[in-house]
Amino acid sequence: MSKIIKCMFFVLLAAVLPLSVHAQQVTLHLQDVTVRKAFRELEVKGNVSLVYEKNDVDLTRKVTVKVDNQPISKALDQILKGQELIYKINT
């Protein structure tokens, strides 16, 4: 019986782990900083890695970001606002 319980635990864990990045909350307050700096701050505070093609993103554009205990996607939406870009969150 305990083998079945252990197996179910790992199945449930594998099903729940991918949701953690999508549900991960971040607080980020940045005023008039470059996209490059906003990305760095998001990586640190959100404990994530951002991968992007430098030629596709205007890293010198100034942005203001204010998110309080919101999903990482909300911060990315504010950072990338006005740029015709889409992003994908990989788990």
Image (cartoon, helix red, strand yellow):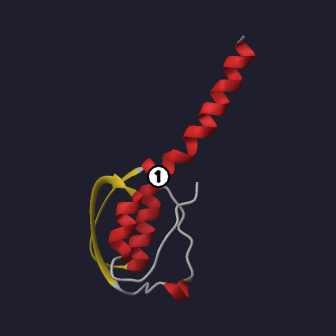
Q: Residue at x 49, y 70 (%)?
A: 87
Residue 82 or residue 49, whichever sits in front: 82
**Dot 1: element:** helix
Residue 42 image offset from top left, x and y in percent? 42, 64
Q: Quadrant of residue 74?
A: bottom left
Residue situated furthest right in the rendering: 3
Residue 14 or residue 54, whichever sits in front: 14
**Which quarter shows the N terminus?**
top right
Residue 45 image offset from top left, x and y in percent? 41, 57
Judging by the rendered image, the residue that carries numbered circle 1 is 22
Q: Name which residue type carries label 1.
A: His
Asked if residue 31 is positioned above or below residue 25 in the image, the reply reads below
Residue 9 or residue 59, whichever sits in front: 9
Residue 38 or residue 82, whichever sits in front: 82
Asked if residue 55 is positioned above or below residue 46 in the image, the reply reads below
Question: Does residue 17 appear left or right of residue 76 in this picture?
Answer: right
**Which quarter shows the C terminus?**
bottom right
Question: Does residue 65 appear left or right of residue 11 in this picture?
Answer: left
Question: Does residue 46 appear left or right of residue 33 in this picture?
Answer: right
Q: Residue at x 54, y 63 (%)?
A: 49
Q: Residue at x 40, y 75 (%)?
A: 37
Q: Quadrant of residue 68?
A: bottom left
Q: Residues within 10 Å of mark 1 (few under 14, many from 20)?
A: some
